[in-house]
Amino acid sequence: MDKQDMLKQERDAAWRKELRAKIKNKERTGFERVKMPEADPIERSHSYVEVNSGLSAGEAVLEAQRCLDCANPTCIQGCPVEINIPKFIKNIEREEFLEAAKVLKETSALPAVCGRVCPQEKQCEATCFYTQKLNKPAIAIGYLERFAADYERESGNISVPEVAESKNIKVACIGSGPAGLSFSGDMAKLGYDVTVFEALHQIGGVLKYGIPEFRLPNEVVDVEIENLKKMGVKFETNFIVGKTATVEDLKEEGFEAFFVGSGAGLPRFMGIPGENLVGILSSNEYLTRVNLMEANKNETDTPILKGKRVAVIGGGNTAMDSVRTALRLGAEKAMIIYRRSEEEMPARVEEIKHAKEEGVEFMNLQNPIEYIGDSKGYVRQARIQRMELGEPDSSGRRRPVPVVGSEYLLDVDTVVVSVGVSPNPLIPQSLPDLKTTDWSTLVVDDESLQTSVPFMFAGGDIVRGGATVILAMGDGRKAAKAMDAKFSGTFKSETVTDSN
Amino acid sequence: MNKVVSKEFFSENVVRLEIEAPRIAKARRAGHFVILRVDEKGERIPLTISGSNVAKGTITLVIQRVGVTSRKLAELEPGDMITDLVGPLGQATDVKKAGTILACGGGVGVAPLLPIVEANKKAGNRVISIIAARSKDLIILEDQIREFSDEVIVMTDDGSYGEKGLITEGMERVIKREKVDEAVIIGPAIMMKFAAEVTRKYEIPSIASLNTIMVDGTGMCGACRVTVDGKTKFVCVDGPEFDAHKVDFDEMLMRLSGYKDFEKDANDRYLNQHK
Ligand SMILES: Cc1cc2nc3c(=O)[nH]c(=O)nc-3n(C[C@H](O)[C@H](O)[C@H](O)COP(=O)(O)OP(=O)(O)OC[C@H]3O[C@@H](n4cnc5c(N)ncnc54)[C@H](O)[C@@H]3O)c2cc1C
Ligand SMILES: Cc1cc2nc3c(=O)[nH]c(=O)nc-3n(C[C@H](O)[C@H](O)[C@H](O)COP(=O)(O)OP(=O)(O)OC[C@H]3O[C@@H](n4cnc5c(N)ncnc54)[C@H](O)[C@@H]3O)c2cc1C
Ligand code: SF4
Ligand code: FES
């Protein structure tokens, strides 16, 4: 049965029909979209409490009632991993919250995370019937996803998936970000003996060292990691594959296949004069000091610059996380300097909204071209150039062009550079046979995600460049499926080199 | 968690720790370093692997007490655990037969110099080592350096041991006396800066091993960046060794002082708690 028939059959279940009959569509479309309860902007900008506090059960049910359980659920097409959205939402409507969580887990390994960090407004909510046909605010699919996943976690009834009989096959997962975690979960379920190797001292990749507590509490991620441990997944922290041991060493130790989920952790700088002055740092350094090293707490040893006038360069999620972290560290003036306009900002709209509420100043269509320091080498000023939008570039966004004669000096004492990341080169450096692109991402087969090295698969940011949690998660699952097929002898796609 | 196996004070402020780390002991080469976090509240700091014992599965670190973390390390006793230890990091030293090597170590820089001296000697080079420090009690690893050097010159700023004078004076003397094919310079940034000026004058190819501030040590943060030949490099993954004549030492010196006030606060806090 193909996917469409399957969806149709499920939609025809008696309980779904009953729910649809209970409230008229006209009535459903008349309800207002739920508002996410949030911590007070002034208070939260001085603390690390989670900004969104989550829907109550009552709010979730009301929001679920807005969903029309469409015959052609276009929302699913917007989801990179095609979660059965109406099915989970209708389970919320009938108050079968644990069942809703189960539906999510059929497709997503990390629903509590994705419900919080996915750019829903560009994905499922952009293709929801409400957005496309009714010109009304979409169903709050992200909020509902988070609700169901949180409900399950908080109920204590979190289900540890059943693990198949051991196959006695050792596989290695390199990196513990969302790609690695979801790969490991699926492989453990299938009975493989999985070990995750992580370079840092904490498990979780960007979910831990990058995305701040006020957006994604560590606890949410830790529960997932605990679950994986219960399923028999082993974790080795402080272990850099390619340095601590090579892939060859691990093969000798009995590892038969590898998944590379090593992320795109390398910060880019702009290469403008003065960028190495004291007080100018990458968003990775800034966020790592706070999120991984807890430098914001007095009792820890790691220092952090608590600037009063902080400029963050960039317009992505990383920039928003940095500028809001600056506020929490006591900045009096926290600024976003972005070379395009707000419309082109890659950050989630909710993060932009939250940043504004918290008092972040947005200086759009502006770009630094030089930094000026004092005699001790501390940054004191940024030379800023104004920009205007010209013709669209290869990304389809209008290219920013400098406005002649528009330069001015801006006083700053801390600058956080957040203009993108590159793939981590540690693995490719240690494996000459591994094919990479001109952008240093790994070359993989589109279907199987196998690299140019047989029995080595890869996914997430190391393949895509800086992308998203949901795509990394989806890749991990896809690679697990392909790797299992390879071991079971049902593998179809060729390796990248085989075809040469 | 990695266990401290043995400990020895070279002087009041310089301690050698032998630590269980079998994989690192096996994988490491001269020039590699580790990053460690001494306890749950600790920061991550880089330290050169000064030696290893593959059979025992241990590595040795030589640590100079300068701030909180190095103090905490100096207080560990055999049997104690270090919370996190990762490595080996950085690019290994490119050791080849080059002729006569002038190995210059200042202060605790002698610790990272030792494995390079050893590797150069084993590669068949003539090795002349100059080890220098402010005063006698800061001269470390003299016997170990002697074991792998054809000649050792010891110098102190105050003349309390060996010859009185700066390391640059000793270097010039050797260079004027005989043909030096390559120099290796490791020590405080300011010493490396002036030592590199000497070898530049005599056009001797030189490498310096840079000790910038680091966080992750895997290329992820950029805290360790320096300018080499006009380009920004990350010391943890591109280094720690670079062409000494191309490093912008002034910028490096400036960047090293970036967290001085915080380091002082953390150190004072620690000393207050442990009075
Ligand atoms: C600050 C910030 C905010 C973001 N916000 C969002 C958001 O709101 N929504 C969203 O969808 N996406 C967001 N992203 C992007 C998203 O986090 C990434 O796309 C995603 O984490 C990629 O997952 P991954 O598993 O591929 O890699 P990562 O999460 O980067 O994990 C890779 C892991 O591999 C480890 N590693 C690397 N090399 C080795 C090695 N040789 N041996 C062992 N371990 C190794 C690394 O230490 C790291 O822990 C954000 C990113 C950042 C930095
Ligand atoms: C690749 C590399 C290898 C190193 N190898 C060794 C080694 O083998 N043995 C050793 O003792 N040290 C070594 N260092 C230096 C060591 O990392 C620092 O001394 C240590 O981080 C200080 O931490 P702390 O908390 O004790 O002091 P902090 O409180 O951080 O600093 C105290 C004082 O030391 C100065 N300082 C801080 N960091 C450095 C640094 N990186 N270099 C010089 N001065 C610094 C500060 O300016 C301050 O005045 C190495 C550094 C690098 C980058
Ligand atoms: S498109 Fe919107 S209304 Fe239709 S099923 Fe999906 S979420 Fe519900
Ligand atoms: S220490 Fe973070 S990039 Fe070098």
Image: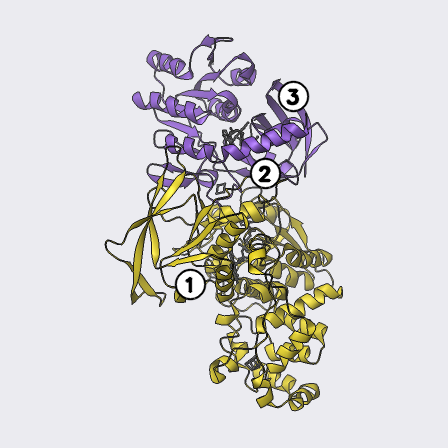
Chain colours: A yellow, B purple
User: Which disc, if any, is residue A99?
Assistant: none
| Chain of the residue displaying label 3 | B
How many angstroms separate mark 3 from mark 1 (CA)? 56 Å
| Image vertical order of residue A2 relative to residue A321, above or below | below
At label 2, which amino acid type do we have? Glu
Circle 2 Cα neighbour tier, 10 Å, few/some/many (<14 / 14–19 / ≥20): many
**Residue A122 visible in image:** yes
Does the CB distance between marks 1 and 2 fall below 8 Å?
no
Secondary structure under the numbered disc 3 in the rendered image: strand
Task: Specify whether A392 is left or right of A112.
Answer: left
| Chain of the residue displaying label 2 | B
Q: Position of residue A391 (x, y in %)?
A: 28, 67
Task: Specify whether B7 is left or right of A245.
Answer: right
Q: Nearer the viewer, mark 3 or mark 1?
A: 1
Does the CB distance between marks 3 and 1 fall below 8 Å?
no
Residues tagged by mark 1 and mark 2 found on one chain of the structure: no
Name the foreground residue: A241 vs B270: B270
Circle 1 Cα neighbour tier, 10 Å, few/some/many (<14 / 14–19 / ≥20): some
Instruction: Quadrant for the C terminus of chain A, please.
Output: bottom left
Circle 3 Cα neighbour tier, 10 Å, few/some/many (<14 / 14–19 / ≥20): few
Mark with earlier residue (2, 3): 3
Name the foreground residue: B183 vs A289: A289
Say which quarter of the image contains residue B70: top right
